[in-house]
Structure formats: structure tokens, C-alpha cells
Image: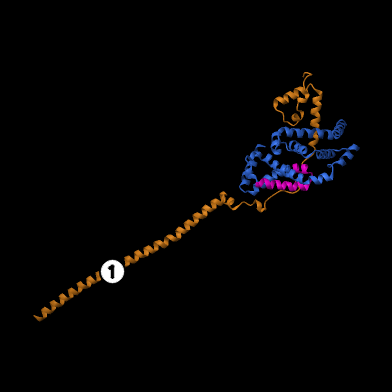
Amino acid sequence: MSSSFDCSKLDWKGYALGELDKNARAEAEGHAATCQACRGELAATRLTLDALSTLHDEEVPRRIAFVSDKVFEPRWWQRLWSPTFAAACVVAAAILVHGFMSVTRPSVDSAEIQARVDRAVTKAVADTEERQAQRFEEALTYLQKQNNLIYKQTTF
Amino acid sequence: MIFREVEDRDLIAKARKGDVEAYNLLVSRWEKRVFNYLLRLVSNREDALDVSQDVFLKAYQNLPKLDDAARFSGWLFRIAHNEAFSLLRRRRPESELAGEPRGDDFDTRHARGSLLPMELSLAVETALGRLNDDQREAVLLKVYQGFKFEEMAEILECPVSTVKSRLYTALDLLKTTLAPSLSLSDARSKVRGES
């Protein structure tokens, strides 16, 4: 490096902290190879950072958790949006609809069927009575003819 | 690290839907980092634990406002920073009355020239305690939490130049404060290496 190079332009702290880009790092390393003062500056910074690294993290005295805190309970509308709850709602609705249909449909059908049966029975009874009356009339007419015939034979 | 980020994102998504267990898992991953950051900033274990709980509570309540789950760490430390400085502001009058920062005992030990590795840690803790809050926080975020300058600027809501200024000043002060201890420790290590 030339003697006119301004060492103060070099960011040795940034270099030690890994914040320089590739070009800046190369420039700094090239200069450090020829400048004892900058090597000393870098070494001192690294020594300070090494000292800081001797301070280790402490364990957390108590676990931080929010399991039973009501503040963290999901609201009712949040529960509604959960896939499991929504699926359960769909299944429950399907069961209810099916149950309703299966309960109401037989009652409607049976009434109608009963009415049809009643009408059919009434008609059948009427038809039978009509046929019986007709046969009775025929039988009565036949008997009267037979009586008339017997009467004529006995009087002559 | 990539897998970790993906998993964190999944946990954040579940926590946003009210999955407390997912959030607790997220807390378990970050609580040690947040607690130690706060411990070194507020210098009191119970306060650090209380503030940690507040931080995670606020983080949960504000999760829906987190635009990008990949930026969770910076966002979480932003909340931690706010909570810590809120405590420090409340505490300030008391500290000012109490006088100088902790660490006078270290000077006595150091004067005797009897530093051991554990005492070097104490020396570092003492030296950190002598920085002002902004400088100490810059060191904590960079050296102990590994944030980049840009991330620190977002957490602290200040320009990168301010972040660098605080950090570099802090490192210069630490170098000066720790220099005697470091040379002593270094010399002792060399002697041990030669023997």
C-alpha cells in the first residue's frame, strides 16, 4: 500500500463483525498485510469480541407458557373456523336432516295409504252389496216365476 | 436454519388461528434468547423474566399484525426493546439516585491481578454494565443475537449510521475497559501454553 493510504477509512470493526461486502473485505485484507497498525487494530477488536463471547447465556428460570390462560383461548368464531369443527357441523347437520326425513316421511305416506285403503274398502263393500242385491232380485224373480207356474198347473 | 425458519412460519400461522400449543412451542424456541437479551439490558433476573412474559403476551396479541412471518425475530426483538426501555424509563429516577452502575467490586479484584476465566466473564458483565443503555443494547443485538446492521436499525427504529455509531463507540469503550484484563488473561494463557 502506498504511504498516502488513509487507514481510518477502513472499517475494522465492521470487518470483524462480518458486515463488509466481498470487495471491502478484500481491500481491508490487502491493506492489513502491509500495515502493522491496522493489524493491531483488528487484533484488538477481535480480542474484545472474544472476551464478550465468554459471557454465556443463562437458562430461563421458569418456562414461559400460556396453556391455561383464558386470554389465549380461541374465540367462538375462531373455533367455528377450525376444519375439525366445521366437518363435525356438516356431519351433524346431515344426520339431523336424514333423521327428520326418515321420521316425517312414513307419517305422510301412511295417512295417504290409509285413506286409499278406506276408499278401496268402501268401494269394494258397495260393489259387493250391489252384486248381492242384484242376485237377490234375480233369485226372487225366478222364485215368483216358479210359483206362478206351479199355481197354473194345480188349477188346471 | 432454513428448516427452522419454515417451521417457525408454520407455528406462527397456527398460532394466528388460536393454536396455543403452537405458540408455546414458538415461545420455547425464543424464550432463552429474549430472556438473556433482556437480562443483560435490565440487569435483573426477575425483571427480565417478567418483561419476557410481557413480550410474548404482546407478541401473541399482535401476531395478526406481523406482515411477514420470516421477519419474526426482528419483530419480536422490537417488542422486547420497547418493553425493556419502558421499564428502564420507569426505573431511571431510582437508578440516578442510586448512583453509578454496578461493578466496583471488579476493580478491586482486578487491581489484585487475580483474574480467572470466570472472572473474565464477570469483567465483561461489569464492562457491559458501564455502557449506557443504547450502547449496551447495540452490543447485545449484534454480538449476542447476531442481527445485521439493517435488522438492528429496524428493531431500534433508527438509521444504520446511528446503529454503527452506538456499536462502535461501545466496542471502543469495552476495549478500553477490558484491556488490562485481556492482556493479563492473554499473558496467562501464553504462559500456560508454554509450560
Is A38 located above or below residue B128 in the figure? above
Chain letter matching colour blue: B
Q: What is the chief secondary structure element of the magenta stretch?
A: helix
Q: Residue at x 81, y 30 (%)?
A: A44
- On screen, residue A113 versus residue B185, left or right, reads left
| Kind of residue at disc 1 | Ala
Is B142 located above or below residue B55 in the figure? above
Q: Colour of chain A?
A: orange
- On screen, residue A102 versus residue A56, left or right, reads left
Where residue B106 appears, as percent x and y from the top left, is 87, 40
Q: Residue at x 84, y 45 (%)?
A: B98
- On screen, residue B144 versus residue B120, left or right, reads left
Q: Chain of mark 1?
A: A
Choose top left, top right, bottom left or bottom right for residue A155: bottom left
Residue range highlighted in magenta: B36-61
Q: Residue at x 70, y 26 (%)?
A: A22
Is A155 located above or below residue B134 in the figure? below
Question: Would residue A62 be counted in the magenta stretch?
Answer: no
Where residue B103 appears, as percent x and y from the top left, is 85, 41
Choose top left, top right, bottom left or bottom right for residue B190: top right
Q: Residue at x 68, y 48 (%)?
A: B57
Question: Would residue B39 be counted in the magenta stretch?
Answer: yes
Residue annotated with mark 1: A126
Where residue B189 appears, as percent x and y from the top left, is 85, 33
Single out the residue that lies furthest toward the left.
Answer: A156
Tag 1's secondary structure? helix
Where residue A136 appears, as percent x and y from the top left, is 22, 73
